[in-house]
Image (cartoon, grey):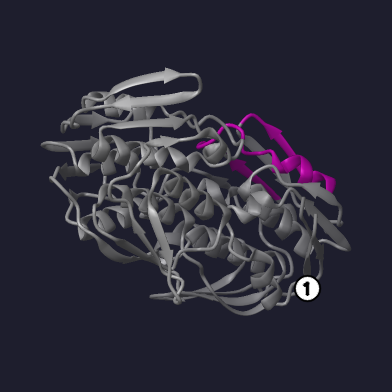
Amino acid sequence: MEKLLIRGGSQLSGKITCSGAKNAALPMIASTILSDEKVTLRNLPYLQDITTMFELLGSMGSDIILDENMNFTISSKDLKDTEARYELVKTMRASILVLGPLVAKYGKAKIALPGGCAIGSRPVNYHLDSLEKMGAKIKLKNGYIEASSKRLKGAEIKFDGITVTGTENIMMAAALAEGKTTLTNVAKEPEIIDLANMLNSMGAKIDGAGSDRIKIEGVDNLTGTNFEIPADRIEAGTYLAAAAVTKGDITIEGINPNRLMKVIDKLKDAGAEIEYQNNAISICMNKDVPNPVDITTAPFPEFPTDMQAQFSVINAISNGTANIYETVFENRFMHILELNRMGCDISVNGNHAIIKGVKSLSGAEVMATDLRASASLILAGLCAKGETIVDRIYHIDRGYERIEEKLNYLGANIVRLPS
């Protein structure tokens, strides 16, 4: 199992370009099932989850071609199989995103209950209940979801809780359903808007993405399209946090700052100087010790849960005490034990972490437990004294494209150790 060896103490500086967003790319790849024509996706990040999703579509019969410009063209006409097998989906919860498109287009699907990061309950019942309201028959059998429908019918659907993948899945299913579908209490994340824009470019009729209510008028078929994956706001936020903990001065290009305003505001509260324009964000951390920053995670447009672990590190080396409240996932403080091994002073009570700033961190051998936890351990290693070894980095490879290369380009000292 590969590891990262981090020699701390380097001050980050320079410019990097943000990669395409994994959380936008995965539902877009799934949505290609809905079309009989070729769909080309540009700016896809090279990540394990992307590879897994392509393997999944390939196993069902999709034809996937990579051109010389690193663009992927997917043709999913006449799939031979509508089953997503456990061996392919056990590491990636986003595999559930093929459920809606398969039932809408082919009238049936058999999907293994998905795996992924162990960060708490992310129930699939929102997906299943909604599909049943649209006329699908659902069975849970031997660890698989079996769904069938002659043709889905439009429906009034109110989600019991905010769900990003649930909103995406049902939005895709409704695109080919008969009649009108209205979704309320939906997720508002930018990735929802991105998926709606792509589907509309394929001939769908979707209105209201990014608001509390999404209206979809079903159509008989969708065409092909050529669509670019937007930049990854969480990747950008992670590198901004890396600059904050290393007293760095960096610019991230290719990112829309409007998608990161809560993160930017909290970085300013920590003492960072930040400038931004239409497609770039610059941060300069002149302050020797960050200010403590209280955080409460919540769905977009509030502070993202995917940046909570990174801000734990900023607060860990701050000049005071900070409180972090995690309201999205109930088991997302697993990185705290590993950070404390590096000298942090963090206590947890339920969904509340109390972080007392310390003067310095010490390098140690630590183990990643999920994707964003991996990022926090790398950030801690960057600002710690001595060497840090981060184990189980397959988590980081699921969501960050060439993270050690980008950080080394900015002046870090990170080596990937082979298995």
Image spot of residue 347 (x, y percent)? 74, 37
Write down the quadrant of residue 124 in the picture. Answer: top left
Q: Is residue 321 left or right of residue 295?
A: right
Picture residue at 49% right of the left edge, 29% below the top: 113
Specify whether residue 8 is in view: yes
Identify the amino acid type marked 1. Answer: Ser
To which quarter of the image does residue 419 belong?
bottom right
Q: Position of residue 24 (x, y in %)?
A: 41, 55
Could you tell whether 334 is left or right of 219 in the image? right
Question: In the orientation shown, which residue stands out farthest toward the right?
Answer: 386
Above or below, comparing residue 146 to residue 180 in the picture: above
Highlighted range, magenta: 321-350
Q: How many marks?
A: 1
Question: What percent of the width, then of the height, locates residue 38?
Answer: 28, 60
Q: Looking at the image, which residue is at 67% across and 51% down?
A: 394
Residue at left offset 27%, top offset 42%: 171
Horizontal arrangement in the rendering, residue 177 relative to residue 23 (left or right): left
Magenta segment: does it hold 334? Answer: yes
